[in-house]
Structures are given as C-alpha cells and as structure tokens.
Amino acid sequence: MFSSISDLESALLSCDQCKLCQENNHGPTSYNGSACSPLAIIGEGPGGVEDEYGVPLVGPSGQLLDKALWSVGVTRDKAYTSNVIKCRPNKNRTPTVEEGEFCASLWLDKEIAIIQPKVIIALGSVALKYLLAPTARITKDRGHWFTTKYNIPAIATYHPAYLLRLTGKDLVKAKWEVYYDMKAAVEKCQELAPGNDLKSETIPNLLELYNERKISRLSKNSL
C-alpha cells in the first residue's frame, strides 16, 4: 500500500501493466485537485487534451464540468478528480468493462483508500459500471444514490462529453438533471463533512496550471 497520494502518482505515471498504454497515447494520466477534499469526482478515461496534459477532465468536457460545478458551489481545486481508466484508448473509443475493472483495481481503488472522500460523483457509464455494477445503466441509475464497495455514498450523473453532443430541449433537460445531481452531492458533503469550503473565488485555469506537465509529456514522447 502506498503511504501517500504522491507516492502512488509516481508509480502510476510509469505503469505499463496493460495494453492501453500501447494504444497511441502519451502514457498514464493522474489526478487533479485536492486529495484532502471530501468530494471525489470520478470520470471515465482521458481524451486527447487530457492525454497531452496528463490529468483528467481539462479539455472541452472538463471546462463544461467546471461551469456545472461552479453553479453548485464547487471549484476543481477544492475537489478531487480522477478517472477509472488512466490511459487514453485509441481514437477515444469507449473502454470496455474489463479494461475499467483491471485499471481501476490497480489504481483508483488505491487512490480512494488514501484520500477517503465522503462523497463520490460518478461521471458517465464507465464510472457508474465500475462503482456500482457492470449491469448498471446511466439512463436508469442517474440521480440515484448508491453505496460503493468502498462504503462511500455515490451519485451518478451524465458525463459532460455526453452533454456536448446534445442540442435543443435534450440539452436543456440534461443540464438541469446534472445540476440537481451535483447539488445533491454538495448537500451530502455538507451533511457528512460540515465546514469544508468547496469553492474558490474564481474557476482555476487547469490548462495553465498543468502546462509544464504537458510540455514535459510531449517532449518526452517525441524523443
């Protein structure tokens, strides 16, 4: 067992234990935000921007997530964000349940054991299937509380990448559903961990914050 999240991250970033690290990406991505936060946000896997920057949800999906969280009183520097899958699948394909289980059993389980959040938001189908059950469906189980195997309460909502594909009334409806799901998560955090500040004065610029990591990853992989 790792003694700290920084020790885990060092090992994670050199992981080569499955074929995903060979699928035309820049290697494993890590986490961002505060490891002391009572709120953990668990997504699916890195996209192209996340693969370059080495951290989850910093591209267009992440920027939409920032806006959604801001509306319920959360900024990403005050929450902990990670993914079930650490390496970007080729052409952004959806990871399989088996890939999610293998990767998360190696890394996400250990992350959660170290940070011990009070509440988890599961973003999208891959996260829901790992945290609840392989048969779970985001369209059916979204918005419902469940207890994870970590004995931590979790609520699932749509992944922001899904919202980016919607238009018109479907988009408006889904945005409101995400708002109420996230609002419920914040209220649960306030109940279980009162007094925790989840919001900074401004939304942090994660692309700027992790730009040096991006430069390092891209230069390393160009050698």
Image (spheres, rainbow, N blue to C red):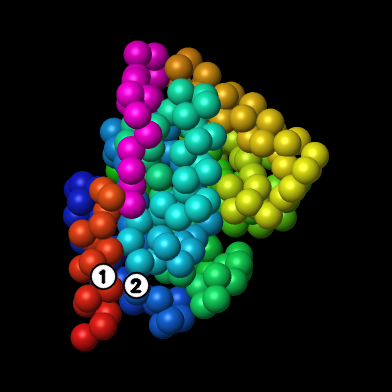
Residue 105 visible in the displayed image: no
Residue picked out by circle 2: 27
Who's the residue at 27% across and 73% down the image? Answer: 218
Secondary structure at badge 1 equals helix
Q: Is residue 213 left or right of residue 60?
A: left
If the image is split into quadrants, where does the N terminus sit? bottom left
Residue picked out by circle 1: 217
Q: Is residue 27 left or right of residue 118?
A: left
Is residue 203 highlighted in magenta?
A: yes
Who's the residue at 52% across and 26% down the image? Answer: 71
Type of amino acid at the residue the image marks with label 2: Gly
Query: Which numbered disc, 2 or 1, marks the residue closer to the eye?
Result: 1
Q: Is residue 86 left or right of residue 212?
A: right
At label 2, counting other C-alpha atoms closer than 10 Å, the crowd grade (few under 14, some 14-19, many 20 or more) is many
The extreme front residue here reads 168
In terms of sequence position, does the residue under pointer 2 or pointer 1 come before the other?
A: 2
Type of amino acid at the residue the image marks with label 1: Arg
Q: Is residue 183 above or below residue 20?
A: above
Q: Which mark is residue 170?
A: none
State the image quarter where residue 118 is shown: top left
If the image is split into quadrants, where does the C terminus sit? bottom left
Q: State which region is magenta.
A: 193-207
Residues marked 2 and 1 touching at CB (< 8 Å): yes
Who's the residue at 72% across and 50% down the image? Answer: 166
